[in-house]
Image: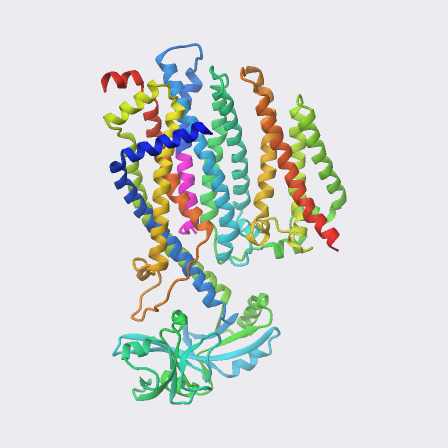
Amino acid sequence: MNRWLNILDYAIISLLRRRRKQIALVVIYTLVVAFFASVIFFTGALRQEAVYVLSDLPELWVQRLAGGRLVPIAQSKIDSIAVIRGVKRVLPRLWGYYYDSPSGAVFTITGSDSLPKGLKLLDAAIGGGLDSNQVFCGSGFPETHFTGLGQQLGLIDYKGCLHSFEIVGRFSSQSDLLTRDLIILSPSAARKILGIAKNNYTDLAVEVWNPDEAETVGRKIDRLFPSVRVVTSAQLRSTYEALFSHRGGIFIYGALISLFSFLILAWDRASGLSREERQELGILKGIGWQISDVLWMKFWEGAVISLTSTICGLVLAYLHVFYLNAPLLRPFLIGWSVLYPEYRLQPAFAFSEVLLIVMLAVVPFIAATIIPAWRGAVTDPAEVMQNG
Amino acid sequence: MLTHTWIITQTLGQTIAVILLLIVVFKSLPILMHWNRESASFLQLKLERRTYLISTIIQFVFWYQIAGLLLFLITVNNILPGSIKGAMCATGVLSVNIFGYPLLWIKLIAVIVYAQFLFLNRMDGREPLYPLTPNKYYWLFPALLLVIADFILSLLYFSKIEPDIIATCCSISFSTAKDSSIFFIAANVRMVPMLIFFYLSFALLVISVIFFNRGPELSFVISLGFTTTAVFLLKNHFVKYIYGLPSHNCLFDIFWGRYYYIGYILFSALIISLICSLLLLTLKYIEKGLSAPVKPIRKILQWGAVLGSTLFTLLCSIYWLNWIFLD
């Protein structure tokens, strides 16, 4: 044990003695680790965000398709679905997208006379439901139009007529990911803007008593009505999961190339021993160091370099993702839109992620330096000391 | 699925392991052919130097494989169930295609083979004359085969996971016992004889390891019997008491934080016990050629075999007794 500690001690002293040579290596190594650690942290946090967001959704929703495209669904379907055993409630939904030409942004319009489940208003002028000339909106519209609570919001309906609404409530920024682009109108006003006829809805949300039965109830609905598409929240969850992992994975592949080029640098650095280094090894062996001692020393040197860089990289990635909100990765990983939700990622720091990053960073480095280290360790002391 | 970060990391690690082992096997061929302990030629000196490289690489690959096994367990038990419909833990994830379980077995066997080589290497390194060289290098061939099999199976397994196919996890695999013979057996074998056999084999293992130094074959056979019974009983009997659910026979949920990661402790104890009894057997066969005293080594291995099996038995029994006395 003592012998190992002495060798470690020597390795650290020898690294510090040649610190100028190591700094460039450590800096590049740190940057490479920081890059893929950022991707891992970021996708992990997004995945958690998606789980949190999707937890409030109903288990099933039913959409009507015609020619592969979404069309409004008739109210009569509600009663037919509500009688299926296992169904708790069928909630008709009115929603659609609205292109706002002054700001160039696309807003989501929802028709509802009360607040959707799980959303909180930051400030509200009214206590109860919405009148036909009032709206609740997310932070997107007031920001792009420089308006606020109590002021007017103009929307053009599908026929081209302008309608004016009073903003009576704004959502808090905590739910920005969900509500940034949201405008909630009363159902009658929403029908007018979106052009949905009376007794028609955009789609239906279905709540079931037992979430485990959602899949079966969904299959039943599918069989009863040939023109509908049934989406389960479990499907949505795995789609998001797959999407984030897939995008993250593509980034990691990109990072692997930089890792490989870095490894070539490390390999080259480890095999091209300078004259002093060769002499040092020769002297160490001359005074009685075994090949295994020198190998251990080289191993400790590699371990110190790679652990230092990995820890620095982890800290950098943590700051980048959770403190600065991942400015370098966000545009590529979450999609593109004029209205970006301004939200803070919740620090999701799993031990398994750290293990993953350490494996990705340390294993290839040590592997790349084993053979050069051995070459150095088997140097013949007499030869080195004679030839210099 | 090959774009998943966890899978990329493992595939990268496996690729490195295959490359390093290929280098090692290639470098060990001259040692196997030309090693001559008595010679003082330059070739012999070169070969002796080469042994250091080989043992360093094998040590590295061994530790990587241990970490890789951990990474694989986390992947199939905690990460992938989120992406595979119907899968709640590794049972569902491993059974999404035919490569899952063989992959897990290969990884476990590989750990034992590396342990065997590292032990031989360690014993050899203690001697000035390297009595076990070059014969110990024959172990590199099964190690290489296992690492290649591991690599190919990993690629096949991960690339053939289709997230939209519904996996049959515990809920289904345990309710329809007729599908699989092992569940069929489990439903029919009475637990009491198995439990008696388990505790008996544990007692026999401890006695044979401590008192019959000359017969490690016996201890190894008992250890094999003990390990098999232990895994069978853990799956069909003890886990119920760990979960506190009589219907839940899942072998992989015990690796979750919810159950205090007890699975890692239980399986580490079991594997350590098995490896130590195997190494005791190995020690008997190489003992004659060794000049340094082997007694302390044997003592460590005996302690490993006894403590590992005792820890496993004790932990399982505590869970079980806790429920008996609680009611």
In the image, residue B38 lies in the stretch drawn in magenta: no
Can you give x and y, in whole percent of width and height, for residue A285 in the image? Answer: 34, 20
What's drawn in magenta, residue-wise? B1-19
The residue at the point 44 percent across, 55 percent down is: A349
- The C terminus of chain A is located in which quarter? top left
Q: Nearer the viewer, residue B28 or A1?
A: A1
Would residue B195 appear left or right of A59 to someone viewing this image? right
Q: Visible in this render: residue B112?
A: yes
Where is residue A376? Give x, y as percent: 32, 26
Q: Residue at x 37, y 82 (%)?
A: A194
| Residue B102 locus on image (x, y percent) | 54, 42
Residue A139 rendering spot, x and y as whole percentages: 35, 75
Identified at 43% across, 62% down, the residue is A240
Q: Name the colour scheme.
A: rainbow
The secondary structure that most of the magenta stretch takes on is helix
Q: Residue A347 appears in which quarter of the rendering?
A: bottom left
Q: Nearer the viewer, residue B221 or B165?
A: B221
